[in-house]
Structures are given as structure tokens and as C-alpha cells.
Image (spheres, helix red, strand yellow):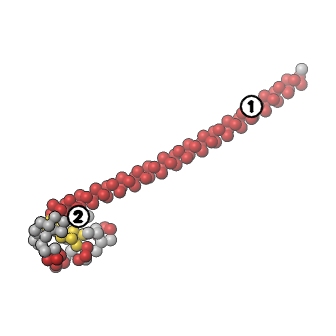
Amino acid sequence: MSLRKKSFSKKMKKRALNRAKHMCEVCGKQVVMTTGEAHHIVPISQGGQNSASNLKIVCRPCHIKIHQELDRIEALKIRKKNKRNYQADSDIIIKNLKDTFIGLAKFLEELDKISKLTKDAVNELSNNLK
Ligand SMILES: [Zn+2]
Ligand SMILES: [Zn+2]
């Protein structure tokens, strides 16, 4: 998403300038061929075309602002995605911990049964020896 990418033809830009009555289509400032910039409404990277309907005439400051805003939105999207991944990871860790504790509780229960059985067996043996 480069500001300098000259992907619209000069002819196309000229036509768009006339359509916009030589005004920035964001702030309305007067622009000419050299000061007006052709902006892709839908970026090429997101499937936007080099077509007249995807061309917006903007002045330099507005163009910079638009792209700063787009970059900010993109950064937010990435942050949100990372947060979601982190959430999924911690959900898995918590589930694994729960499973481990359930397994441990079952093991202790078994151990308790075994030690009781052993105690009973020892008692029985010592009773028999009396
Ligand atoms: Zn402007
Ligand atoms: Zn642009």
C-alpha cells in the first residue's frame, strides 16, 4: 500500500480530476494534476482494481491521513487476531490442567482403595497369626 504507487493511468487520473472538479474528495481543497493524488478506495492488495470507480482524488495531506488510518486499522486487526490466538492457547492450557487434576484425583482415589485393601489384608493376616 504505497502512497507513490502509480497504478492508475494519467488519463484515468485526469478524468477523475475533472469528475472531482479539481477538488480533494475528502476535504474539498483545490488540487491540480501535480498536487492531486489518485487513491485506491479498495487497495490492490485487497482485490481493488485500477478502475475509475475505485479511484479517489485526494490532496497529499488527506492521502497521508487515509493511509495512516488504514495502517492503524490493519494493526488493530493483527492485534485482535493475536489476542484471539492467545485466548485459544490459554483455553487449551486450562483444559489440559483440568484433565490432569481429574486424572490425579482418580489416581489418589485408586491409591486410597489399594491402601485400604492392603491394610485389611495385613489385619487379616495378623489376626490369623494370633
Ligand atoms: Zn484533502
Ligand atoms: Zn492511497
Q: Position of residue 60 (x, y in %)?
A: 15, 63
In the rendered image, which quarter is residue 26 located in?
Answer: bottom left
Q: Quadrant of the C terminus?
A: top right
Q: Position of residue 88 (x, y in %)?
A: 48, 51
Q: Quadrant of the N terminus?
A: bottom left
Relative to 130, say whether 40 is above or below.
below
Q: What is the crowding at mark 2: few (fewer than 14 residues within 10 Å), some, or many (at least 20)?
A: few
Number of labels in the image equals: 2
Q: Residue at x 44, y 52 (%)?
A: 85
Amino acid bearing label 2: Ser
- Marks 2 and 1 sit apart, C-alpha to C-alpha, by 73 Å
Say whether residue 105 is left or right of residue 96: right
- Taking the image in four quarters, ligand 2 sits in the one at bottom left
Which residue is at the far top? 130
Residue corresponding to mark 1: 115
Which residue is at the far front? 28
Residue corresponding to mark 2: 2
Q: What is the crowding at mark 1: few (fewer than 14 residues within 10 Å), some, or many (at least 20)?
A: few
Viewer can see residue 105: yes
In the rendered image, which quarter is residue 63 located in?
Answer: bottom left
Say whether residue 8 is left or right of residue 76: left
Relative to 62, say whether 123 is above or below.
above
Amino acid bearing label 1: Ser
Q: Residue at x 35, y 57 (%)?
A: 77
Q: Position of residue 69 (x, y in %)?
A: 25, 58
Q: Residue at x 81, y 27 (%)?
A: 122
Query: Which label is found at residue 61?
Result: none
Q: Position of residue 5 (x, y in %)?
A: 21, 68
Q: Secondary structure at mark 2?
A: loop
